[in-house]
Image (cartoon, rainbow, N blue to C red):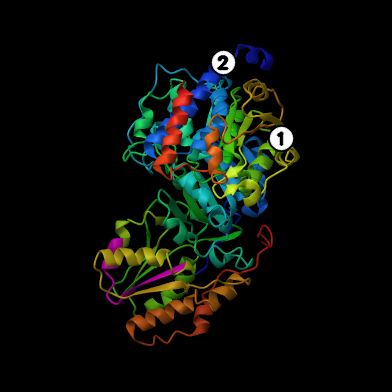
């Protein structure tokens, strides 16, 4: 299995997409090139507003612009969109349900920047904020097509975005569809629901599991709020041994919790195992290292499947290593951070 | 233009409005056994000047009834287009009209009184104050009369107004975007972020008027967290600043109408007991007036009777 690697999927795509949308503005907080909008700024300088390292004010000014009919797209690292300016996000943007787009890059452990840069509870925090829509892209196709999805929402949208070198897992002609999971495989033993970069990681293990005779329904979910997709409901209902969620986020409050809520509200009596950061902060290191350290990898997925089935599937680490296709380091990264 | 407009302003009418604000807020505080009285004393002339002629607002057919609370904005409702905000009390928006964003939402009672005195809110509007199901809320939100944004979490209005000012600049509108602030908000970091960004983006039609009454919830600001020298700080952030006696209507209006190529701030130094010296007995706790005894209530009844004379 090998995927096309797309360099900077947001950069030119966002420029092309914005061309006939004069209401679309970009606001940044000193991370313009790091968020692949440096060329956007040079292309549409009259629609670009540098707000400096001052996210609280950026959030408020975005709200004012949105009230006047503009559609500000805030670009910065995910962590800076909801931690420091949360009150401003809530009272200036979310309460009036304004069309502000929060494009958050390097979610979870994607950044080597350590705890200050790692948005590990953003979904948990923002799921609790009324009026928010939460989207997470899992590949280059979604990084491209999330723009139309967010644009159509009459309210604030938070996007967990990808940048740099991004795999194209889903065909270019199969765009992100709002509140609609992708069915990547079907089987009746286990239902696996993954989001963001965890989908690609899970796909390393799935063929090996299937070879061992494990029937897996695998869904890729890219709309985390609302969480009302009937495809998800149906997949949860078919799981014989249990449900597994896998997310680049804390297991508290994110995808795993959303699935737990659905299962318990609907009386689905199978075990749920949540793969993610186990209520812990992380630290500065490479993505691959952190995924291994915190059990966010294909190997952990195999272990959880084995525990649900109560059997040893005899999948070796070398088999999993062979199925890794993406190099961690890349010249296409905008900056070290 | 500034000079000409000053000459057409009716300072006597503003004085009447200011007196009316103090009386209405005191009457309400007496009947309600509580109210933001010192804010009425300090900001009466400020709001009288704004609503009495400084602001260029759309005319209304007559005073508006405060609508009942109809629900919060939600995704899927075209919130910005049809959601009824309190800005309707400021008349129709237009390119050359001014906008007036209220920041210290706890001044709501004072703002409502000013709207009544200027025939924008129905005479009995305060009867709905803090009543369940009413939009005439104690801490105003964007559905409350005169409010266009939700700013009870202080210092958020200036950023939102800055965004509105950028939008109006993009569209080439001539109207000004005004923000009414209280001095305590200068303790919040966001205020300074907004000042820096407004100067950087050259928002020359952004205006801020501040009630510098030197008091806050915990007491005198100098004992809680001093913000002085405020004018020098704001100037250093790239703004034009005028400092006036906030009860001198001639000075206040002249400062408000000053033309400026920079964003401009009018710091109105005010007296939180002006017009009601009895409040001096409450010092240093002036933030909210609740009567401690029948005797005290009677004293304020007497003060009201004097005011009416």
- In the figure, residue B116 lies in which quadrant? top left
- Please provide the residue range marked out in magenta: A233-248
Q: Is residue B146 visible?
A: no
| Total marks in image | 2
Disc sitting over residue B239 in the figure? 1
* Quadrant of residue A310 within the rendered picture: bottom left
Q: Please state the horizontal and vertical placement of residue A168, each as a whole percent of the image.
A: 51, 59
Label at residue B12: 2
* Residue B241 belongs to the span the image colors magenta: no
Measuring 44% from the left and 84% from the top, which residue is drawn there?
A: A315
Can the viewer see residue B252 in this picture? Answer: yes
The image shows residue B98, relative to residue A299, as above or below, that is above
Q: Residue at x 57, y 31 (%)?
A: B274
Asked whether A194 or B126 is in front, the reply is B126
Q: Mark 2: give few (<14), some (14-19) or many (20+) Cα within 10 Å.
A: few
Residue pictured at 65% horizontal, 60% vertical: A333
Q: Secondary structure at mark 2?
A: helix
Along the viewing direction, whichever of B254 and A208 lies nearer the viewer: B254
Query: From the image, which quarter does the C terminus of chain A lie in?
Result: bottom right
């Amino acid at each position: 299995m090998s995927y096309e690697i797309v360099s900077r999927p947001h950069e030119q795509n966002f420029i092309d997409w914005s061309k006939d949308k004069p209401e679309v503005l970009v606001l940044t907080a000193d991370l313009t090139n790091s968020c692949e909008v440096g060329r956007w700024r040079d292309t549409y300088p009259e629609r670009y507003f540098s707000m400096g390292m001052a996210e609280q004010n950026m959030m408020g000014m975005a709200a004012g612009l949105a009230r006047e009919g503009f559609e500000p797209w805030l670009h910065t690292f995910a962590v800076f969109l909801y931690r420091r300016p949360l009150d401003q996000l809530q009272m200036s943007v979310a309460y009036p349900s304004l069309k502000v787009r929060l494009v958050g890059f390097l979610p979870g452990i994607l950044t080597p920047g350590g705890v200050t840069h790692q948005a590990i509870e953003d979904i948990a925090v923002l799921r609790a904020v009324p009026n928010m829509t939460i989207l997470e892209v899992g590949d280059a196709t979604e990084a491209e097509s999330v723009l139309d999805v967010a644009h159509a929402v009459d309210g604030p949208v938070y996007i967990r975005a990808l940048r740099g070198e991004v795999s194209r897992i889903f065909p270019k002609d199969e765009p992100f569809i709002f509140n609609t999971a992708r069915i990547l495989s079907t089987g009746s033993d286990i239902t696996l629901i993954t989001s963001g970069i965890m989908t690609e990681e899970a796909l390393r293990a799935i063929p090996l599991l299937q070879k061992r005779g494990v029937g897996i329904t695998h869904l890729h979910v890219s709309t985390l709020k609302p969480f009302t997709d009937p495809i998800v409901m149906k997949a949860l209902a078919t799981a014989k041994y249990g449900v597994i969620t896998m997310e680049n986020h804390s297991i508290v409050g994110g995808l795993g919790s959303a699935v737990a809520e659905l299962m318990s509200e609907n009386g689905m009596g199978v075990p749920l195992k949540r793969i993610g950061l186990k209520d812990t902060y992380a630290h500065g290191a490479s993505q691959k290292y952190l995924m291994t350290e915190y059990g966010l990898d294909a190997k952990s997925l195999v272990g959880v499947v084995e525990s649900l089935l109560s059997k040893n599937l005899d999948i070796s680490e070398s088999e999993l290593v062979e199925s890794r296709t993406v190099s961690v380091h890349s010249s296409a990264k905008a900056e070290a951070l | 233009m500034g000079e000409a407009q000053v000459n057409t302003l009716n300072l006597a009418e503003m004085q009447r409005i200011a007196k009316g604000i103090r009386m209405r807020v005191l009457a309400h505080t007496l009947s309600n056994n509580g109210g933001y009285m010192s804010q009425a004393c300090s900001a009466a002339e400020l709001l009288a000047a704004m609503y009495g002629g400084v602001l260029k607002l759309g005319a209304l057919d007559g005073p508006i009834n405060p609508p009942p609370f109809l629900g919060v904005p939600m995704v899927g409702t075209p919130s910005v287009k049809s959601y009824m905000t309190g800005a309707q009390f400021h008349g129709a928006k237009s390119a050359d009209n001014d906008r007036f964003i209220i920041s210290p939402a706890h001044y709501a009672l004072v703002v409502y009184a000013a709207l009544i005195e200027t025939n924008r809110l129905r005479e009995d509007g305060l009867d709905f104050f803090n009543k369940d199901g009413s939009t005439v809320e104690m801490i105003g939100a964007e559905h409350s009369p005169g409010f266009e944004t939700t700013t009870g979490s202080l210092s958020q209005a200036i950023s939102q107004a800055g965004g509105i000012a950028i939008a109006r600049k993009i569209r080439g509108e001539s109207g000004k975007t005004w923000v009414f602030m209280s001095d305590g908000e200068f303790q919040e970091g966001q205020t300074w972020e907004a000042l820096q960004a407004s100067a950087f983006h050259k928002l020359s039609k952004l205006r801020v008027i501040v009630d510098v009454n030197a008091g806050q919830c915990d007491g005198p600001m100098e004992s809680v967290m001093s913000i002085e020298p405020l004018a020098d700080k704001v100037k250093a952030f790239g703004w034009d600043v005028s400092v006036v006696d906030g009860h001198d209507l001639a000075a206040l209006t002249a400062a408000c109408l000053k033309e400026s190529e920079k964003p401009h701030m009018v710091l109105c130094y005010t007296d939180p007991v002006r017009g009601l010296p009895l409040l001096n007995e409450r010092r240093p706790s002036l933030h909210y007036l609740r009567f401690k005894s029948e005797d005290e209530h009677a004293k304020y009844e007497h003060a009201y009777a004097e005011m009416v004379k």
